[in-house]
Amino acid sequence: MKIKELIETSKEYDKSKKDYLLDTKEFEFNRLNSNWEHTQLQMVIKASELGSSWAAEDHLKTSVSMTDWALRQLCQKLEGHPPTDYMLRCPPDLRAANLNRWREKTERKMLVRLDGEHARAFLSEKYSAVGNTSVLEIADEMLGDVPHEMYDTWIGPDGCHVRILVADHAGGHYKIGAYISNGEIGNTMIRVLPLVQRTSCKNSVIFGDGGFWQRHINVSYPFIRGAMKEHLGQAFNLSVTYVGKLVEAEMEKIPDIKDVINRICINYDFSQNVRDDIMRGTEGQDTAMAVTNGLSFAAKGVQSPDEAAHMEIIAGLFITDRKRVLVGIDEGMEE
């Protein structure tokens, strides 16, 4: 998929999205009927949809359901921090009563993000709503006429992952490029990171070191545009350096490779199936590059695009700072 196609898809998703900056007194919870599995969020809106005109007599009252992700965020922001797992186990009427009790004890504003009839996120009022469409348009502008190819791209209502290749390297054994991501519900930072693809298997390795990681807190569109412009070029240049590190890793023996992989899987709570895929991805080799190959190979088998990118970042971290991987230090996906 080309980046302009991603932009058009993102714009279609945008049509059903709305944002409200609400005080906790401006919404409440109830169960509309017994057919709903999840508590309905009853929002009494006394402020306008962000970016729209509003008059005092235009108070609205609308009902939307909540995603489990949104419920988790809400519980984190309410006074007393009611446990999400408990709330999910409660029947709708009890869940509504519990949420209303803690909501009434909480005085704060929240950015409530809707997609159609679903509340998809409860975020801080400091959250800067830099959307997928904006990030993709900036990337498109920065690439301009630079020859490139895109692969393993993903765009959804709540986030995007883009992998871009711009040149062959090391005799065609590797390709260099950049990885760009964004999230809209507190799920993923804005990131522009160096990327290397191993051409024989199309596996990706993403390098967090030296890249751009930005939370959506108190940032402006001009700042993001400038930072992305700066770091996209840097990512392409740094990818050349990381190819050299991958070539060195091809020669570095890991005598206890099974133990190392087991340790990584424990540290990051990977399943047995993922562990088996990592082992297959080593292609029977016992080098540092084999571990990275295993991680990037296993990333292709996971369902979540967020998790796939996470594993490719861990694969890069194993090359640049192995100790952090072996003790389970996480690069972090969520904000």
Image: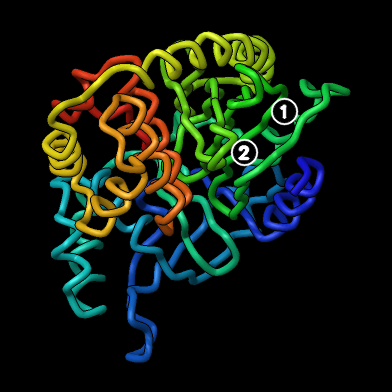
Q: Is residue 115 above or below residue 249?
A: below
Query: SS of the residue at dot 1?
Result: helix
Identity of the amino acid at label 1?
Ala
Residue nearest the viewer, comparing 328 with 176: 176
At 57% from the left and 30% from the top, the residue drawn is: 179
Quarter residue 107 falls in: top left
Residue 271, located in which quarter of the rendered image? bottom left
Circle 2 or circle 1, nearest the eye: 2
Q: Position of residue 188 (x, y in %)?
A: 45, 38
Give the mark nearest the N terminus, 2 or 1: 1
Report how far apart the C-alphas of labels 2 and 1 lie in the structure.
10 Å
> Is residue 307 shown left or right of residue 59?
left
Quarter location, residue 245: top left
Q: Amino acid at mark 2?
A: Val
Residue holding disc 1: 139
Q: Position of residue 267 (x, y in %)?
A: 15, 38
Determine the residue positioned at 40% across, 64% down. Answer: 67
Q: Is residue 298 left or right of residue 146?
A: left
Tell me the residue that label 2 is attached to. 162
